[in-house]
Image (spheres, rainbow, N blue to C red):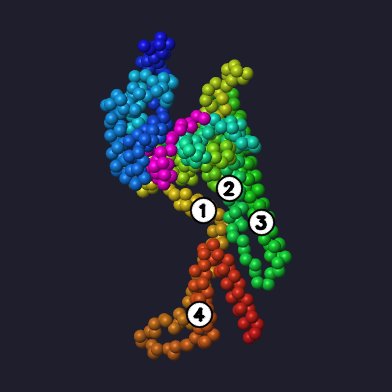
Amino acid sequence: MKAFSDFITECYVNILISEGRGGKPEFNDEFANIKLYNHLVGAFNRKEGLGKKVRIAIHRREYDKVEDIVKKEIEAAKSNPNHPLHFANANDDGFSGGKKTPAHEEDYYNELQRATYGFNSFIRSRQGRATAAKGWPNVPQGGEHEESLPGWEGNPKGQGRVDYLYQDIQRPERQLRVSGKDVGGSVVQSSQGDQTFAGLVAGGRQAGIELMRNLLGSRPKKEKGETDEDYETRIAHLRAVARSERDKKIADVTDAASKIRDILNSSRGMTKAQQTELQPQIQSMVADFTQKHPRAAFHASQEAIRGTQQFGKGKDVQVVHTTGGEGSALKDPRATTVSLRARGGKGQLKVGGEKVEGKRPMALAGDTGEARTGDPNLPQQGPITPATAQRREKIAAASQDTDLQQRRAQLKKAAAQQAAPAPVAAQQTAPAPVAAPAPVEQQPSPEEIARQRAAASERERIANLPRRHQQTALRNSQVRQQTADQISQHMS
């Protein structure tokens, strides 16, 4: 028999729904993804026949077979009251209002159907296939708060970035930490002044380190005739310059981030109309920051997704899983784009627990928008590998480095000049006019032939070197050639 308190609660919830209050009855998509995954792989009942069959099919990469099983399970869940996924057998977890009601049934099955896209994309990825084939349970993490690391300049506590935790029961240290996002776009985080400042500075710190490493590159070789003391002095100078550029980049980002923090904090206590009027100015400052410090903005978005600097290794996100429709995929966080937008403060301002006039401070919301390639009507391409994402990241950084582009242009020009055929050879291959008598061909001297052969051999040697060494080798080759020319002129 149903308890009287439960009966009253259910009636109250149904009244709210019927009157249009309390929102549409919904079932949480994260719980749907977890519920479907754990059932299909037999996470908590490894001896059960369905889970074993699915795990073997995943291990063998028989994805069509798995998809057929998933479809049959969803159909059985709707028609068979004894099925573990049937609505009648679900507990109250994940339902809006904190309690399951008959009005939730439609959305419950809709979310289970949407979860099939995420499951099918998960098992097709390298990490997802290995996890599902082993039957690691998926434990909900959304909404769990974590302590920030000491020294974090934003909130001392924050909502953890991990939504799904796949963990080996026998060895808990083996886990896959996943951030779940809707395939149509989601809000990564919403941060007020201090937290926004800390995230942008964290991005600037990473951008500064990246700039320093790019400036240093590989350790230069010792030049001919250079003493050990001069060589070490040159290396120390290069390192000092790189560290100085790193510190300058961090200082510039910190200064820009502090201005954004101050204007966000200044909106505390404003009316809704005043905050709306201020919103374009904040958005303009964010756009200016992104334009002047693109790498810092990128790394700040990565911190918003992963939370590495705020929560530390072991509590940060390893991969992002977009779910809920066509285009679902398991991705490297670096392949997820985040755009910042200013929004008004949510809720009435409180002082000493009492509501006062004005709104809470404005904040910056980070939205994800999964970029599609090619025809937007086609399904989303597969997940970008970490190596591809890292290569694209380096190319983007190099394309924005004006000094590096100038050096590349100079090297290309020098290589083109060195590869150009000698004037003598050009005269030798030029066709003679038909009407004029054939001119007497001027044979190159043995010294000229030897020089051309040596230049061709040198170009071939440089081309066969690793790409990171070609720039230094070409510069050294040019210095040697100039020195040889000077000696030749002096001797003549």
CA separation in Å, label 2 and label 4: 45 Å
Q: Quadrant of residue 204?
A: top right
Q: Nearer the viewer, residue 118 or 343?
A: 118
**Residue at the front extreme of this rendering:** 47
* Residue 277 shows in the view: no
Between disc 3 and disc 4, whose residue precedes? Answer: 3
- Residue 406 in the image: state x and y as whole percent: 56, 60
Amino acid type at circle 2 is Ala
Left or right: 258 in relation to 426: right
The mark nearer the N terminus, 2 or 4, is: 2
User: Cβ–Cβ below 8 Å for labels 1 and 2?
Assistant: no
- The residue that appears at 58% across and 47% down in the rendered structure is 207
Where residue 268 sits, quadrant-wise, is top right
**Secondary structure found at label 3:** helix
Residue range highlighted in magenta: 117-144
Give the mark, 1 or 3, whose residue is nearer the N terminus: 3
Q: Which mark is residue 239?
A: 3
Location of residue 1 with respect to 162 vertically, above or below: above
Q: What distance separates the C-alpha of mark 1 from that of mark 2?
A: 12 Å
- The residue type indicated by label 4 comes to Arg
Question: Which secondary structure class fits the magenta region best?
Answer: helix
N-terminal of the pair, mark 1 or mark 4, is 1
Label 4 sits on residue: 453
Q: Is residue 143 magenta?
A: yes
Work out which quarter of the rendered image holds the N terminus and state it.
top left
Judge left or right: residue 89 versus residue 486: left
Q: Which residue is mark 2?
A: 207
Q: Amino acid at mark 3?
A: Arg
